[in-house]
Image (tube, grey):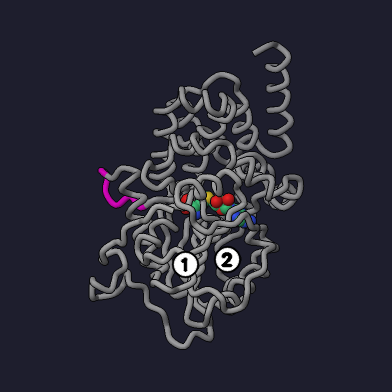
Amino acid sequence: MNIFSALKRYLLVVVEALLCGPSYARFFYWSRNTRILDPDATWDRFTKLENRYIRGLFRHYPPAPMRQLLTTLYPKFRDRVKGIAYHYDISNDFYRLFLDRDYMLYTCADFLSGQDTIEVAQRQKADFILNLIDPQPGERILELGCGWGCMMKLIYEHTGDRDNLSGYTLSVEQKRFIDEAYGFNVELKDVVTTDYAPASWDKIYSIGCMEHVPKNQLLPLAQKLAAAIKPTGHLVHYFFCQMSAAPPAKMLVGGADVFPGVELATWQQHLDTFEQAGLRVAHHSIHDYRPTLRAWFERLVAHQIEAVELVGVRTYNRYLCYLAEAWRLFNDRDLLLMRFVLTRQDAPKVWVSPLYATDRTKSPVAQPEAVLQPA
Ligand SMILES: C[S@@+](CC[C@H](N)C(=O)[O-])C[C@H]1O[C@@H](n2cnc3c(N)ncnc32)[C@H](O)[C@@H]1O
């Protein structure tokens, strides 16, 4: 690093610390490093508890009204649609390096024992979600934000019905991957602005996509989705949210640099919004994101050389810092991961998840899998 870029980095850290808080500045100071970060030091730096004075400063500076203002203002300067390309179109091969090898799921897995690998944990999560979606052959099923298509693949394996299954994403690279791997019906559509025909879907599910929906768009979207599902259908809404309207300053990093344009809602806002839209909560559960973040961190470190070759040092460093920082945000309960099933308030009968069926044969995951035919 030459003297000018070193000076610029030090100057920026001071300005950012004064304006957006020291925890925010710390993230950028390390993620902008042009040398590969040491993984142990990085993990400890972001996850270990600081002494109480530093911790107090990190949590409470800038003061709450300023943090709230910044949280609202920041996404206005970053376009959320461009933000999708910035985050998801980096390189499919890069994500393949640290996500689970079987599914490439980029959302919280279910680690049920200390021995589970990320592959096992993602399969457990997928089974859990499959039970919430409860897909049946002939049902029209839509995924909002379908990632690399693996949940669609699992649904297809279960129902054998390709024609009634659709997905939306804004990532060109993800669509290319799904087209090549599975040939599912996936469209490049913005879930926020697209129109949904009334009562046209039996099941709509979203796994980690609603975080990208601006707060002021949540209600109009929830209303469109409530109208789009059939009265007998339901919505699986899986998201993480912030606990407070004025979260610590380090959370600003998300909307600024990791997922540009993202503006998280609180869990109360999610609940109020979906109830206001005419939906009722039929299932809700809270899950622990920390083991997944740790597993991705370790995988990324194990593939450091390939990762740096694919995306460069700065992006590699940014991901190390963000995975460790996100772990801490979940650990401090600043973020919470929730799974909801929502049914229409005018549903003819109450839907009960096969997760709670006493008869095991009623559970989708207990039934034999259809063979996946190549596209
Ligand atoms: C965290 S990834 C989750 C992917 C997948 N559901 C999984 O579990 O692996 C979020 C997904 O939402 C998509 N997404 C975010 N905002 C979107 C929007 N406004 N319209 C369509 N897709 C969106 C992204 O392209 C990405 O596929």
Q: Which residues are magenta?
A: 110-115
Residue 336 is at least partly visible in this image? no
Element under disc 1: strand
Identity of the residue drawn at 37% across and 41% down? 101
Q: Is residue 211 left or right of residue 165?
A: right
- The residue pinned by badge 2 equals 270
Cα separation, mark 2 vs mark 1, equals 10 Å
Q: Position of residue 314 (x, y in %)?
A: 59, 26
- The residue pinned by badge 1 equals 340
Amino acid type, callout 1: Phe
The residue closer to the viewer here, 80 or 66, is 80
Q: Is residue 259 magenta?
A: no
Q: Identify the main secondary structure in magenta.
A: loop
Amino acid type, callout 2: His
Looking at the image, do the residues carrying marks 2 and 1 touch, with CB atoms under 8 Å apart?
Answer: yes
Q: Position of residue 74 (x, y in %)?
A: 72, 46
Label 2 vs 1, first from the N-terminus: 2
Q: Position of residue 7 (x, y in %)?
A: 71, 17
Q: Is residue 29 left or right of residue 335?
A: right
Identity of the residue drawn at 55% across and 69% down? 271
Element under disc 2: helix
Residue 270 is at least partly visible in this image? yes
- Circle count: 2
